[in-house]
Every structure is written in structure tokens, then in C-alpha cells.
């Protein structure tokens, strides 16, 4: 698990199961089946049976409970762990529901099958006591940034043709109706900057698989966007905030260069469409009357995306690194932000830099934790042999 400030991400390996030489068919389990099982006397049930029912429920549904999602599009087949071939699955849910997750695991007697949960991210520390109190299980914690880098390198190595990409044909406002995703060869990436865009932002310089360091970061990230949208628009979820932003016009909220100069500021190559003051129009009563909640959501998205793009650009220049990779759950289904970042880096670098993105967005930390666990299991096996 990677337990972040807003989302908890789960990655698990499902070995291929064979029965009589053929693929064993999984039983479809619905939420109703689970509810019926929960209402039965679980003390008399077998932990393996409970686990099989839970596994079948997870693998036969896209939406899990009230807020969990299994990202089927990201599944990675034919992966190898400990001599077995299988599939990597990816799930995310709200971190605010972690205690419910622990209670759910307790009901299905998962502690009977293992006494350890492997985790990374800040929540691995925050929820350590809850995990022990509710489940009686220990949280085995792994370093967040190490897991992030390990996860990026593993997934690209096993998904090289479609993992990394950049946007082509983008416009400054992110609408970009003719934009398209173009695959990028990330096989020899070093050095590169990785911008981990979650609730907050961490920016790392990566020189090699084992040489990396955190350069800087920002408290202004995805959590800021959602928090502002909740305050300004009354929305309640990230998805709702994004839908509003898609229908908004940030120029009704932000003051642009042309609003100040009447056009472009040519001496410093600033187009008239450049944002001069985020939310700058909101100081005028007549402008406040003309804007909508969707306009506010779009302006919040533009403000935060531009801010992080600028910090990433300055970091790359300071580190003398040309390649910037953006990851993190803020970018999940957030094409507007990605296209804005793509345009900004291309424009301000005069075409020498591209904003690069990865399909598995915010799951790299969880993948890295799984790899750390796998390394530990292999080490223990070798020690037992000796």
C-alpha cells in the first residue's frame, strides 16, 4: 500500500491459478454476496474461504464499496514474482476511509493469513497504531521516495511501449481539442527530474537507479485544488471538481497580461493570454457577478498547475537537467493539467523540453513497496537455505 494524504493506493499480485491443467474460473461475487457473508457467523468460517470470497469480489468488480476503484485499464499481465506468473492489479480509495478498510479486513479475518501489512507514504506512519489496534497487524514501512523511484523503473521496464508519453498539439488553456498522446522512449532516462504531484508536491533529481535526492517541493498541490474547490464551489470530490473545471472559463477569474497591457508584453515575450494575477479579477464586484462556480474551479486548477510547472522548470534549470517527468494522482484523469504543463514547458523552453507523463500516475510508490517486500522475501528464503 501507498497511503497518501488524499488517496490510498493498493497494488497486489494475483498468481495465475491452474486447475486440471486449465485456467481456474473465478466465481463472480457481488456486494450483496459480501453483505450476506458479513451478516453470517464469520467466527465459524474459514479464513481461506473468506479471503477467496474477498479476492473474487475485488477481481469481479470495478467499483469497490462506496469509494474504491480498481483500475482495470492499468492491469499488467504476465508479471513474474517468486517463480510464478500472474497479474498486477491496481486499486485506490480515499485515505479518510482507512479505518473502514481495516475493519473490513478484520471481518474477513485477513490477520489469520498474515501478521504484516507492507506500506509506504505518510499514512504508513499515521495509521500504524490503528492497524495494530484494529487488526493486530504490524505495518512494515518502506521509504516513500525510494519506493517511488523503484516503482517507476520497474513499471517502465515491464511496460516500455506505452508507459511514457508526452502531449502534442496543446494550447495554453488546456482545452486542446486536437492534442494527442505521443509515446516517448524512456529507456535511458538519466538524469531526470520527477515531480510527484499528489496532495502536496515533492520534486526529485534522479541521477541513476540508486542515486536520487529531493530537491524541493510545495504545499500547493492536489489537496490545495480540492480544498479550494470545496470552499468556493461546494463540491465534495476530486472528480466533481474536475468536471466543474472542464466546463469553466478561468479568464473570467484570472487577470491576464492583456487585461493590464491591452495586448502582449513583447519585450519579455509574454503573450496577452498569460496569467498575470491568479484570481485577480475577483477584486472587482462586477467581475464577481459575471463568473460561475465552474469558472472558479477552472481558475483554481490553472493556478495550481501553473505554479507547479514554474517550480519544476526552475528546478530543472538549477539542476541542469532537461528531462522532467510528472507523476501522482493529481494527474489521474486530469487531461487539462497535463496539457497545460505540456504547453508551458514547450513554450518557455523554446521547444527544448517536454513534459513527460506515465500511465500508472500515482501507483509507483505502492509498486515499489511490493518490490521491497519481494526483495525481503527472497533474502529470507536464501538465508533459510544457508
Image (cartoon, rainbow, N blue to C red):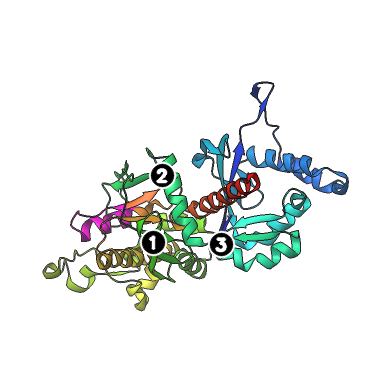
Q: How crowded is mark 1: few (under 14 residues within 10 Å), some or many (20 or more)?
A: some
Q: Earlier in the sequence, mark 1 or mark 3?
A: 1
Label 1 to label 2: alpha-carbon separation: 17 Å
On the image, the x and y values in percent for residue 169 come to: 26, 47
Image quarter of residue 296 = bottom left
Residue drawn at point x = 64 percent, y = 22 percent: 22
Q: How crowded is mark 2: few (under 14 residues within 10 Å), some or many (20 or more)?
A: some
Q: Residue furthest left?
A: 267
Q: Does the magenta stretch include residue 123?
A: no
Q: 168 and 362: which one is in front?
A: 362
Q: Residues within 10 Å of mark 3 (few under 14, many from 20)?
A: few
Q: Does the magenta stretch include residue 354?
A: yes
User: Left or right of 261: which side holds 285?
Assistant: right
Image quarter of residue 134 = bottom right
For the residues bearing labels 1 and 2, Cβ distance under 8 angstroms: no
Q: 34 and 336: which one is in front?
A: 34
On the image, the x and y values in percent for residue 141 come to: 59, 61
Residue drawn at point x = 34 percent, y = 67 percent: 307
User: Left or right of 311: which side holds 364?
Assistant: right
Evaluate whether residue 332 shows in this view. Answer: no
Label 2 to label 3: alpha-carbon separation: 34 Å
Residue drawn at point x = 41 percent, y = 70 percent: 218
The residue to which callout 1 is attached is 212
For the residues bearing labels 1 and 3, Cβ distance under 8 angstroms: no
Evaluate whether residue 45 shows in this view. Answer: yes
On the image, the x and y values in percent for residue 306 come to: 33, 64
Which corner quadrant holds the N terminus?
bottom right
The residue to which callout 3 is attached is 236
Q: Earlier in the sequence, mark 1 or mark 2?
A: 2
Magenta span of residues: 339-355
Amino acid at each position: 500500500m501507498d497511503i497518501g494524504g488524499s488517496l490510498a493506493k493498493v497494488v497486489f499480485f494475483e498468481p495465475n491459478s491452474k486447475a486440471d491443467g486449465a485456467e481456474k474460473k473465478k466465481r463472480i461475487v457481488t456486494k450483496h454476496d459480501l453483505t450476506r457473508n458479513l451478516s453470517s457467523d464469520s467466527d465459524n468460517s474459514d479464513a481461506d474461504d473468506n479471503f477467496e470470497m474477498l479476492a473474487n469480489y475485488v477481481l469481479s468488480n470495478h467499483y469497490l464499496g462506496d469509494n474504491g476503484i480498481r483500475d482495470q485499464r492499468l492491469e499488467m499481465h504476465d508479471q513474474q514474482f517468486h517463480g510464478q506468473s500472474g497479474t498486477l492489479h491496481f486499486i485506490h480509495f480515499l485515505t479518510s476511509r482507512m479505518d473502514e478498510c481495516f475493519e473490513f479486513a478484520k471481518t474477513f479475518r485477513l490477520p489469520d493469513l498474515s501478521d504484516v501489512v507492507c506500506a509506504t507514504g505518510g499514512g504508513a506512519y499515521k495509521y500504524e497504531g490503528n492497524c495494530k489496534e484494529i487488526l493486530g497487524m504490524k505495518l512494515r514501512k518502506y521509504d516513500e521516495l525510494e519506493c517511488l523511484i523503484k516503482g517507476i523503473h520497474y513499471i517502465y521496464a515491464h511496460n516500455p511501449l506505452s508507459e511514457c508519453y508526452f502531449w502534442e498539439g496543446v494550447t495554453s488553456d488546456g482545452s486542446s481539442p486536437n492534442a494527442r498522446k505521443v509515446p516517448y522512449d524512456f529507456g535511458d532516462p538519466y538524469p531526470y527530474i520527477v515531480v510527484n504531484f499528489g496532495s502536496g508536491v515533492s520534486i526529485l533529481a534522479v541521477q541513476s537507479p540508486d542515486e536520487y535526492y529531493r530537491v524541493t517541493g510545495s504545499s500547493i498541490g492536489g489537496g490545495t485544488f480540492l480544498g479550494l474547490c470545496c470552499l468556493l464551489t461546494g463540491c465534495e470530490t476530486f472528480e466533481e471538481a474536475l468536471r466543474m473545471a472542464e466546463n469553466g472559463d478561468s479568464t473570467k477569474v484570472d487577470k491576464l497580461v492583456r487585461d493590464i497591457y491591452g495586448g502582449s508584453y513583447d519585450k519579455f515575450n509574454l503573450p496577452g493570454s498569460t496569467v498575470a494575477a491568479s484570481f485577480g479579477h475577483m477584486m472587482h464586484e462586477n467581475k464577481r457577478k459575471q463568473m460561475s462556480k465552474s469558472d472558479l474551479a477552472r481558475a483554481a486548477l490553472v493556478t495550481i498547475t501553473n505554479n507547479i510547472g514554474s517550480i519544476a522548470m526552475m528546478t530543472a534549470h538549477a539542476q541542469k537537467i532537461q528531462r522532467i517527468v510528472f507523476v501522482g494522482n493529481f494527474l489521474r484523469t486530469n487531461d487539462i493539467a497535463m496539457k497545460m504543463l505540456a504547453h508551458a514547458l514547450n513554450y518557455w523552453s523554446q521547444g527544448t523540453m517536454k513534459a513527460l507523463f506515465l500511465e500508472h500516475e500515482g501507483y509507483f510508490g505502492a509498486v515499489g513497496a511490493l518490490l521491497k517486500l519481494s526483495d525481503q522475501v527472497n533474502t529470507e528464503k536464501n538465508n533459510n537455505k544457508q
